Amino acid sequence: MTSLTLPDIAAQGNQQTLPLDWVGMCGIALPLLIEGRNVAAYADAGVSLDDGTSRGIHMSRLYLALETFEQQTLSLQLLHDTLGQFLASHAELSTRAYLRLTFDHLLKRPALISPLAGWKRYPVSLDARLENEMFHVELSVHIPYSSTCPCSAALARQLIQGQFDKDFADKPLTRDEVRQWLGSSAGIVATPHSQRSLAKLRVRLADGDIRLGELIDAAEAALGTAVQTAVKRADEQAFALANGQNLMFCEDAARRLHQALHRLDWVAGFNVRVEHAESLHAHDAVAESRHHWPTRG
């Protein structure tokens, strides 16, 4: 049988001479090993097509270069080496390489009081670029939390004071009577409004390891009201206490996160965006803060 040389259409000349900014693949299924845990991720991989006379790139070479993620822990060095391999396999075609990884990071979180624990999901994306020997990595993570409005809390306290004056006008009270009134539905006539909120953190990594767990822990500690997983009544009560001790507008939350990220020496720059899904309004309250981060118009 005569062996045939299979045609390489991509290597044939391009009828329209035009470079392209990015060519590659999106949504590649990829297993990752991060912080000792295997996660299912998706990868977007590509390079620039600077040689406008070439019809296309070698996509299979990008795909095969991702195989190293199956054996190695996710790190900045692994990202850099993979992007370098992208460019080495397209030496005559490309000068820029890009890789985006998206996955859900699962952390088992203990309850506030009881011995219960449960898994919490944190959506994560990693964007890595290599251009003119400049390596850039940006880590993004979404962190849910609870926020209680300080204004609403003050208004609720005022209503409770008013109800107290109404119920006990010119009436001497004992400590037990006041305590009983405070524990009754007649006494607590109003409660502050709270809402599930979301912190969207984007950080530029300086060097070292990808410390995803440390980043999430720092953010949740700064906010003080991380949403819970499995709870008993004692945990729910402790959560109500945490909300009462951490009243915050969206501006307060953004400032807390800014200060927490500023203390992480492995973060070269960051952008913080918080979104409070208002229970009072039909719209959201939003605040942003950045440090060593480009302002985009």
Image: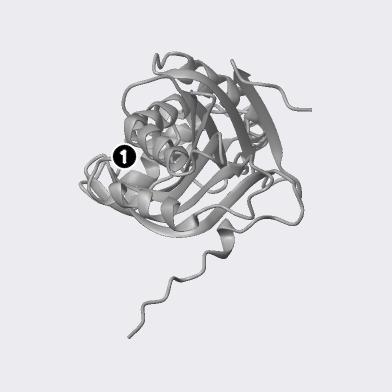
Q: Looking at the image, can residue 188 be seen?
A: no
- Return the x and y of residue 172 as percentages of the image width and height: 54, 26
Q: Looking at the image, can residue 23 be seen?
A: yes
Residue farthest toward the right in the current orientation of the protein: 297
What residue is at 60 percent from the left and 50 percent from the top?
23
Please state if 207 lies on the left or on the right of 137 as rendered.
Answer: left
- Of residues 74 and 285, the one nearer the viewer is 74
What residue is at 63 percent from the left and 50 percent from the top?
54
Total of numbered circles in the picture? Answer: 1
- Return the x and y of residue 196 as percentages of the image width and height: 56, 45
- Of residues 10 and 258, the one nearer the viewer is 10
Q: Which corner quadrant holds the N terminus?
A: bottom left
Quadrant of residue 200 within the rendered picture: top right
What residue is at 26 percent from the left and 40 percent from the top?
73
- Of residues 46 and 159, the one nearer the viewer is 46
* Relative vertical location of residue 188 with respect to residue 57 in this rendering, above or below: above
At label 1, which amino acid type do we have?
A: Leu
What residue is at 40 percent from the left and 17 percent from the top?
264
Tag 1 residue: 74
Quadrant of residue 218 within the rendered picture: top left
* Relative vertical location of residue 147 with respect to residue 107 in this rendering, above or below: above
- Return the x and y of residue 228 as percentages of the image width and height: 39, 47
Secondary structure of the residue carrying numbered label 1? loop
* Relative vertical location of residue 112 with respect to residue 244 in this rendering, above or below: below
Please state if 172 lies on the left or on the right of 64 as rendered.
Answer: right
- Of residues 134 and 109, the one nearer the viewer is 134
Residue farthest toward the bottom in the current orientation of the protein: 1
